[in-house]
Amino acid sequence: MSRLPVHTDDLPLWPALRRHTQARIGLGRAGSGLPTRHRLELQAAHAAARDAVHSPFDPDTVAAALTGVPTVRVRSAAPDRLTYLQRPDLGRRLHPTDRAHLPTGEWDVVFVIADGLSSRAVHEHAAAMVRATTSLLPADWRIAPVVLAEQARVALGDDVAHTMGATAVVLLVGERPGMSAADSLGAYLTYGPKPGVTTDADRNCLSNIRPPLGLAYETAAGKLVALLRGARELGRSGVSLKDESDALPRHPSD
C-alpha cells in the first residue's frame, strides 16, 4: 500500500512552533524528500551562507557609517580571499607594511572591525555596535581610532592592540555563517593581548549580534562594557572573567 505525502503544515502545532524558532522543525516530507517549498528555502539559505563567506569587505561602507569617528585601515598577511580561507595563520598576523600605519599611544581600548567569515555581518552591524558600546563607556576612557581590518581573524586584534599600545582590544568580526544566519556578528574582548601568546581561553566572546533576530546592539553593548570594566578590575579577561550583567541582585541575607 502506498503512503500519502505528509504535509506537516496541515498539523496546527508545527506552524505555531516555527514562529518561535529559526530551527527547521516539522518540515514534513513529500515522498522520500522534503516538500518543495522547504527544499528551496534550504537551498537559498545555503547560497546566502556561501555569499557571506566570499563577498568582499568594503571598508568604505563601514567608515561611512562611522562618520565623525577616526579610522585606520589595515590588512592581514593573507594576500587574497582564497589564501585567507586556506591559511588561517596568515589572517592572524598584520601585513608588514600596514603595521607602520597604526598610530601609537596610551589607549584603554581599541575597537577592531574585521571581515572574518561574513562581510555582510560587518557591513550591517559593526558600526552600530561600536557606537552603542562607546556611548556607554566612562568619559575618561581613552579610545583609540577604530581599525578596519581586511582578511582578518580574531587573533589579529592582539597584534593591532600590541602595536598601538592599547590595554584592551574589542574585535568585531563576521561569524561563520550557518543555515539559519548569514549575518551574525561576534565581539571578542581581550585584555592585555600578547601576539602569539594569548589564546582563546584569554578572551570573552559575545555571539549572534544581529537584531532583530539575534542579540540587540544595546544589550550586547551593555554586556561588553560590563566585561571591559570587569577586565580592568581583574587585570585579565577570558575564563576568569564572568559576564554578570544579567545576574539577579543578591538578597542581603544571602
Image: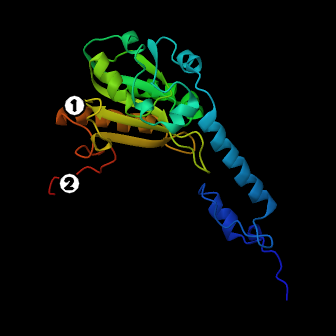
As displayed, is residue 20 above or below residue 106? below
Q: Could you give the CA–CA distance between mark 2 and mark 1, rounded to whole angstroms?
A: 26 Å
As displayed, is residue 132 above or below residue 74? below
Image quadrant containing the C terminus: bottom left
Name the residue tied to disc 1.
Answer: 232
Question: Residue placed farthest to the bottom in the image?
Answer: 1
Residue for point 45% across, 34% down: 218
Name the residue tied to disc 2.
Answer: 251
Q: Are marks 2 and 1 in contact (CB under 8 Å)?
A: no
Does residue 135 appear in this view? no
Of 95 and 41, which appears nearest the observer? 95
Closer mark to the observer between disc 2 and disc 1: 1
Q: Position of residue 173 (x, y in %)?
A: 47, 33
Of 143 and 247, which appears nearest the observer? 143
Residue for point 33% across, 41% down: 204
Residue for point 76% across, 68% down: 33
Of the numbered discs in the image, which one, if any, rests on residue 177? none
Q: Position of residue 48 (x, y in %)?
A: 67, 42
The residue type indicated by label 1 comes to Arg
In the image: residue 23, left or right of residue 171: right
Mark 2: few, some, or many residues within 10 Å (few <14, many ≥20)? Answer: few
The residue type indicated by label 2 comes to His
Mark 1: few, some, or many residues within 10 Å (few <14, many ≥20)? Answer: some
> In this figure, which colouring scheme has been used for the structure?
rainbow
Q: Position of residue 203 (x, y in %)?
A: 31, 39
